[in-house]
Image (spheres, rainbow, N blue to C red):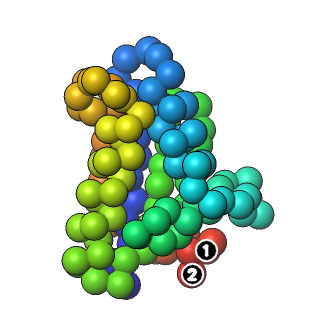
């Protein structure tokens, strides 16, 4: 299993981060016990969405490298939907990581 985490921060004032969170909530979702949201994103499965002031974090688990690459593509596409007509890198700072621990709601 491969744990993936992406932290998204806005690079300039605006509503892009709110639009990104809203974009993800169009998928079937439910609140986890800790107040975070588990979203079932089509083609990649369960994603843990953690929102705090100024950033959004997504945690995912992939069974292999092929699925991990698909997850990166799908999240990148969702970021692009949140910033129509603008380059993603002008609206967001995006930091990908591979944590060693899988968050409890995704186990």
**Which corner quadrant of the image does residue 64 belong to?**
bottom left
Q: Give above or below for 25 relative to 86.
A: below
Query: Could you tell me residue 88's position as x and y percent?
Result: 27, 33
Q: Element at badge 1? A: helix
**Which corner quadrant of the image does residue 48 belong to?**
bottom right
How would you rate the neighbour count of disc 2 (Cα within 10 Å): few for under 14, some for 14-19, many for 20 or more?
A: few
In which quadrant will I find the C terminus? Answer: bottom right
Q: Give above or below for 65 relative to 56.
A: below
- Evaluate if marks 2 and 1 touch, with contact meaning CB atoms under 8 Å apart: yes
* Identity of the residue drawn at 28% across and 24% down: 85
**Which corner quadrant of the image does residue 2 belong to?**
bottom left
Q: Give above or below for 107 relative to 76.
A: below
Name the residue tied to disc 2: 107
* Identity of the residue drawn at 57% across and 56% down: 27
* Identity of the residue drawn at 28% across and 67% down: 70
* Identity of the residue drawn at 47% across and 55% down: 58
In the rendered structure, the answer to whether residue 84 lies left or right of residue 17 reads left
Query: Could you tell me residue 47's position as x and y percent?
Result: 51, 63
Is residue 93 visible to the viewer in this orientation of the structure? no
Residue that sits furthest to the top in the current view: 13
Query: Could you tell me residue 44's position as x and y percent?
Result: 41, 69
Q: Give above or below for 45 relative to 59.
A: below
Please tell me which residue lies in front, 28 or 62.
28
Distance from Cα at disc 2 to Cα at disc 1 = 5 Å
Name the residue tied to disc 1: 104
Residue that sits furthest to the right in the current view: 33
């Amino acid at each position: 299993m491969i744990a993936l985490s992406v932290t998204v921060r806005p690079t300039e004032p605006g509503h892009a981060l709110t639009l990104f969170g809203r974009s993800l909530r169009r998928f079937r979702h439910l609140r986890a016990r800790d107040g975070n949201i588990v979203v079932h994103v089509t083609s990649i499965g369960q994603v843990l969405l953690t929102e705090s002031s100024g950033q959004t974090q997504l945690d995912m688990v992939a069974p292999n490298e092929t699925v991990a690459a698909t997850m990166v593509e799908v999240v990148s596409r969702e970021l692009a939907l949140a910033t129509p007509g603008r380059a993603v890198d002008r609206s967001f700072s995006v930091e990908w990581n591979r944590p060693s621990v899988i968050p409890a709601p995704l186990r």
